[in-house]
Amino acid sequence: MSSENLPQSPESPVGAGQSPVSSGQSSEQRRKPRVAVVFGGRSSEHGISVVTAGAVMSALDRTEYDVLPIGITRDGRWALTADDPARMAITDRQVPDVDQLAQSAGGAVTLSVDPGNRDVVVGEPGAVPTVLGEVDVVFPMLHGPYGEDGTLQGFLELSGVPYVGAGVLASAVGQDKEYMKRVFTSFGLPVGPYEVVRPREWESNRPAARKRIMEFAAEHGWPLFVKPARGGSSMGITKVDDPSGLDEAIEEARRHDPKFLVESLLRGREIECGVLEFEDGPRASVPAEIPPVTAHDFYDFEAKYIDSAAGLVPAPLTEEQTAEVRRLAVDAFEAASCEGLVRADFFLTEDGTFVINEINTMPGFTPISMYPRMWQESGVSYPELVDRLIQAALNRSTGLR
């Protein structure tokens, strides 16, 4: 790839790898920013969130930052965890769990909703709570509902604590595939055919909802993809080849989310592109291609995280196609009012048209994840990428902006 296509980092008063320290102040005199890495959570993506957080913690420069690992258990308890990224990796095809990492089986971490108080407090049953000091920024490595969907972002806004990534609205839009597609359509971005079935409709008039899905299939053909409306990591998604598999696929999707989508198969190539916010605005990385996965029906959770399916970085596209998908990725970032980072996923259809499938406002950061790989190829190393995201969050206020 020629250097002219790579994103160039502009000069800035506080660049990557720097902490905001006044002139003449030595590194010994300054207080390193404390980064709370929050991970785990109540969604079905709990395990991959732990893996992602471990990779980020490994990349954080401990000479520049104090790191405070906070895991959220599957039942919602916030817990201090061991600062041990090695224990946060996939082992023997099993993803880790916050309960395995928590320093206490009963202790709970709390953060005040008082914007004037950023102290983290940890309490143990029957003991006086301990104040651990202030948190300067939160790196929310949660995937799925109860973390990536605007809920945690809203809490941090109330607390006045800066955080990495999209705000409340963009996080919610990025999590809900129905409204994501509606926003993209309103901004003129191309989306594929889809049908949404909401909980009340399925529970009150299942025959009518199923009839609508069958009409959709008659118009667009089989196979169909049935997926949770608010989920990620390809969990709960089923490729359905004919009507006999439809009900089972719907129940699988509804195990993860009572609202689900039905999408038609778009024949073409799967292309991804990363967007990162620089001082002068968002820029797109070189794109990547997800080649056909022969051992799986589609690019599902096992292919992504267990079997380490390899993407092609950069994608073998023409210069015109590369420019177009990068433009569309930034347009999607702006349409959803995103901040920090986004991975935008597209199909390059057989007629040469790009169709956006979805965006991910907190994409995977595991060593094999496509987002960091695309930026590595674009000239931004993994540690620099993590650092840049934290610095952007430190320099961005909470509240209306």
Image (cartoon, rainbow, N blue to C red):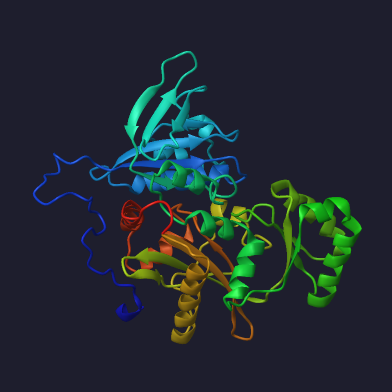
Question: In the picture shown, does residue 330 fall above or below 52?
Answer: below
Q: Quadrant of residue 319?
A: bottom left
Image quadrant assignment for residue 215? bottom right
Q: Is any atom of residue 292 visible in this view?
A: no
Q: Is residue 56 left or right of residue 152?
A: left
Q: Residue furthest right?
A: 207
Q: In the image, residue 203 lies at what x, y percent?
A: 84, 50
Give residue 392's quadrant in the image: bottom left
Q: Give the position of the C terminus as an image quadrant.
A: bottom left
Q: Residue at x 56, y 60 (%)?
A: 174
Instruction: Locate residue 10, reporting x and y percent.
Output: 26, 69
- Relative to 278, is 3 above or below? below
Above or below — where is 350 with respect to 255?
A: below
Q: Position of residue 347 (x, y in %)?
A: 60, 74
Locate residue 9 relative to residue 182 in the image: left or right.
left
Residue 256 position in % (x across, y down): 69, 48
Q: Quadrant of the N terminus?
A: bottom left
> Taking 231 as reference, is 37 above or below it?
above
Question: Would residue 225 be found to the left or right of residue 98 on screen?
Answer: right
Q: Nearer the viewer, residue 272 or 29?
A: 29
Of residue 208 and residue 313, the one placed in the foreground of this image is 208
Residue extending farthest to the left is 24
Look at 44% across and 69% down and name the residue there. 313
- Total numbered labels: 0
